[in-house]
Amino acid sequence: MEAESRFRAMGSDVHVIIVGGSLRLLDLARELIDELEDRWSRFRSTSEISLLNDRAGTPVRMSAPTVELVQHALEGARITQGRYDPTVLGAVIRAGYDRTFELLSDESRGTDSPLRGGFEGIEVDAAASTVMLPRGVGFDPGGIGKGYAADLLVRELRRHGAAGVCVNVGGDLRADGEGPGSGAWTISIEHPLDPKATELIGLRAGPSPPAPGSAGPGVQRTTGATTSSIPGRACPPEAGSCRRPW
């Protein structure tokens, strides 16, 4: 059995393809992504990320997925030596990104924000499941949130019986397990400067996705990878989806 679903979430188009398992898994995918958006959206006042920003300077108890999200964001900041920075919330608000994409317009203007950067001062206590921001620092995970959401969706759908899963959340893509027709997943990555140029990559995944915390969203441009999480658009480019290899 092969089935797919497309829907909007996290301000992006989401595309899920499953191989094997029950059709109920497509409903589960929607439920899981909605739950993660409820936890992580800075545009929802009751989200864990909003609570974390509101209580900067105080340890805040977070769910396990949110603690892992913060850990991945800090890892990304350290690996890139700050070129990726999850604490640019104040800067993006001042630039005008103070509402969801659906509500932005050409007339949108930036608003004042006292928030500053400072990912180096974020404290994570995994044992206590708490995170503390420095006072005056705002947290916004950016694209890592969508990438890690794709990772978690694949892991959970596989755990609930899917033989293979491909998930694309706004261009952050994860494929694992058996592809359609028992073959590899075929993904295309667009050239950043030439939308007509794409590279096709065949992914044949291993028996299971990595355990939480073992690997964050990344790029593996290798045919025959055991597991792969690839930021990019899946083939065909206009569909923004995982491509079946026929």
Image (cartoon, grey):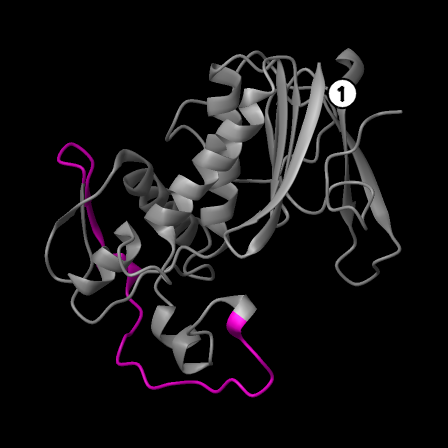
Q: According to the image, label 1 marks what residue?
A: 184
Total numbered circles: 1
Is any atom of residue 18 visible in this view? yes
Residue at the image point whose x is 50% and y is 33% from the top: 151
Q: Which residues are magenta?
A: 103-129
Above-or-below relation of 204 to 228: above
Tell me, yes or no, whether the highlighted magenta stretch contains residue 111.
yes
Does residue 51 lie above or below 215 as drawn? below
The residue drawn where x is 76% and y is 12% is 182
Of 179 and 14, the residue lying toward us? 14
Of the pair 126 and 103, the residue shown nearer to us: 103
Residue 46, position as x, y percentages in the image = 26, 55
The quadrant the C terminus occupies is top right
Q: Secondary structure at mark 1?
A: loop
The x and y percentages for residue 175 are 63, 28
The answer to whether 191 is drawn above or below residue 33 in the figure is below
Left or right placement of residue 196 versus residue 139 in this view: right
Which quadrant of the figure has residue 118?
bottom left
